[in-house]
Image (cartoon, rainbow, N blue to C red):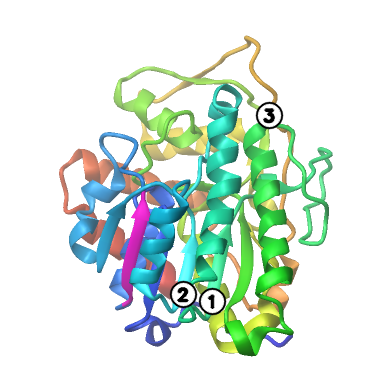
Amino acid sequence: MVMISRGVDANFWQGKTVFLTGHTGFKGSWLSLWLSSLGAKVCGYALAPSTTPNLFTVLNLQDSLKYSQIADIRDLDALQKAVIKAQPDIVIHMAAQPLVRYSYTHPVETYATNVMGTLNLLESLRSIDSARATVVVTTDKCYENNERLAGYQEHEPMGGHDPYSNSKGCAELVTAAYRRSFFSADQYLEHHNAIASARAGNVIGGGDWSEDRLIPDAIKAFEANKPLIIRNTLATRPWQHVLEPLSGYLVLAQALYEEGTAFAQGWNFGPKDSDARPVQEVVELLISAWGSPASWVHDGSEHPHEAKSLKLNITKARENLGWVPKWTLETAIEKIAHWQKAYQNKRDMKSISLNQIREYSQS
């Protein structure tokens, strides 16, 4: 491989049709806004937003997309028809059940969404010949985690202790099987679709109202003038602003589209090692950015298993895609506090969000 890109190419995305699953979610909404601002025609396919408020509605993204279809990726027939209708140039699959603790109480839904949903998407791609690049988004938790301090590399075994993490490891295996069986390099002149998977860290950013996530829980507590209750103060995660992995997905899609199957592999898009930090430190940074009377307390009761340490090795993306993280954890926290304060003050959040995308792109 050769280094082909160092960032998102605005000219590349102009006029491209992108089929984006999960477009109504937190990450999906940020990506929908970014793609639309680049001139891409976004065809969204997802369930209705799961929270009120939610970023998709706050940014009024319905009007920015080519169309938005509210449907379930577990429905193969509906998904296949949507893919055929869109005739996309590029596919980005982000629809998922994304929560670890929820997966303990809803394991069947988690596997059905994350595994069969991915399979349904890949199977649907066999019905079209327009797609030139497909990015299947999974998670850093797809690896078999042995709690080591070194970052996991793309070639290491898939696994996962809890149903969420394990289902994402399964989604990676499904993606690899379809790539080898139906979208291989040997058959590229027939299918023309280069398929890769992308594994990101713990994503944070403004406009996240998801349940059972650290930053949304913290902001909810601060706004109510209550202390945040923390379960695992020492749990270390690869924290990154949402724009970091999204830029990785876009750079990867560009490489797949332009270079083909040479980049049809798994890729890590995590922060620098210095930004893999314990929960307590992240919360204290947010408290500092938010201001008084924000505070936290420790919850010492028992909870379902969660990994204590997790890091990603991003050498491959840096050396072969020219992708590197831009914002430190401190910068990410500052951007989140600014976004949420602006929302509290009833500012124009589409302008605020677009400005953050511009700041990230220019940094």
Q: Residues within 10 Å of mark 3 (few under 14, many from 20)?
A: few
**Image coordinates for residue 343, horizontal then vertical, percent:** 23, 43
Q: Is residue 248 visible?
A: no
Mark 1 residue type: Ala
Please state which of residues 300 and 331 is positioned toward the viewer in this rendering: 300
**Image coordinates for residue 78, horizontal then vertical, percent:** 38, 54
Please state which of residues 20 and 355 is positioned toward the viewer in this rendering: 20
Q: Which residues are magenta?
A: 40-46
Furthest-top residue in view? Answer: 301
* Residue at the (37%, 81%) spot, across then down: 16
* Residue at the (21%, 57%) spot, across then down: 62
Spatial CA distance of label 1 from label 3 is: 34 Å
* Residue at the (52%, 48%) spot, across then down: 203
**Image coordinates for residue 140, horizontal then vertical, percent:** 66, 49
* Residue assigned mark 1: 133
- Of the two numbered discs 2 and 3 in the rendering, the one whose residue sits closer to the viewer: 2
Whether 329 is drawn above or below 67: the answer is above
- Quick one: label 1 or label 3, which is nearer the N terminus? 1
Mark 3 residue type: Glu
Is there CB contact under 8 Å for labels 1 and 2? yes
**Where is residue 18, by image quadrant?**
bottom left
Q: Is residue 44 located in the magenta-colored stretch of the structure?
A: yes
Give the number of the disc on residue 90. Answer: 2
Spatial CA distance of label 2 from label 3 is: 34 Å
* Residue assigned mark 3: 306
Please state which of residues 184 and 50 is positioned toward the viewer in this rendering: 184
- Of the two numbered discs 1 and 3 in the rendering, the one whose residue sits closer to the viewer: 1
